[in-house]
Every structure is written in structure tokens, then in C-alpha cells.
Image (cartoon, grey):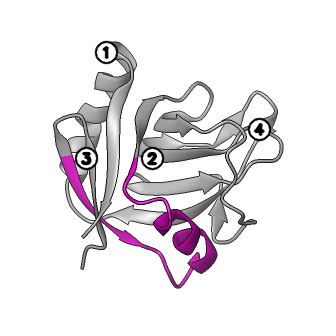
Amino acid sequence: MSDLVIRIADMSFDARFETEAAPKTCAAFKQHLPFVSQVVHVRWSGEAVWIPLGDKQFGVDFENHTSYPAPGQIILYPGGYSETEILLAYGGVHFASKMGQLAGNHFITLTSGLDLLPKLGPRVLWQGAQDIRFEAR
């Protein structure tokens, strides 16, 4: 079952909230739907795209956090050592910043479109920022 649709440029992904594992993060993010921004390619973390959010606060601490999200997993880093950010893994990731290893809350998992992920990363890397939109179903 899908809770939301995520659109990146002309690509569309169904996704589910990880409400049992990250209830506070999911609830906080839902308050911002539809969420519209741009993704750029990560600098230190490997094969992922991210949304830098500066000092934006979602009012959550760590829950269901990981430094190694799998392809199709989306994490929210709530801020602290580095800026607040949302990261979508499309391949191998070791989540980090110039300050070192970080951990983010795994709160969304893609349920369709995983076959598009190998195209997403290189597109963002070589063509630059791409529009992203999270919408509730």
C-alpha cells in the first residue's frame, strides 16, 4: 500500500511511511505535505540525492536511524552536527558530511519505480538540481 507519491523531474515513485519504526518523524513530515523542493547529488555519502534544508527543524530526535540506507529508502537527518536534510539512496550509501559519519531517520520507503533509481543518480549528478514533490495519496 502506498501512502504518498514522490515525483522527481519526470519520474514518479509510490512510497510508504515507516510509521511503526519512525512515528514522530512521519507525523512531523506529514504536516508539511505537499513538500516541494529540489534534489542535488550528495558530496560525501556515495550514491544518493539530497535536499539540503539548512536550519529547518522538524522537531524530532533520532528514531529508526541509520548511516547505511538501502536503495529506495529515504532518511531525515534532524540537524545537529550538520544541517537538516532529506536523503534518498539510489545505490550504496555511507551517510556522512564534512564533519564525519551521520545517521538519519529512515521514515519513507519507495514501493515502486526502483528500476528508475539507476537513471536518477547520474541525471542529478550530470544535469544538476531536479524538482521533487512529495504528495499524500
Task: Name the residue nearer the viewer: 110 or 26.
Answer: 26
Q: Which mark is residue 127?
A: 1
Secondary structure category for the residue under label 1: helix
Q: Distance between the Cα atoms at labels 1 and 4?
A: 25 Å
On the image, numbered disc 4 is attached to which residue?
82
Dot 2 crowding, Cα within 10 Å, few <14, some 14–19, many 20+: many
In which quadrant is the C terminus drawn? bottom left
On the image, numbered disc 3 is attached to which residue?
7
Dot 4 crowding, Cα within 10 Å, few <14, some 14–19, many 20+: some
Q: Which mark is residue 88?
A: 2
Task: Tell me the residue at 72%/40% (across/down).
Answer: 55
Secondary structure category for the residue under label 3: strand
Residue extent of the magenta highlight: 12-35
Q: Distance between the Cα atoms at labels 2 and 4?
A: 17 Å
Work out whether mark 2 precedes mark 3 in sequence or the reverse, and give the earlier one: 3
Residue 5 percent across, percent down from the top left:
26, 59
Q: Is residue 124 left or right of residue 22?
A: left
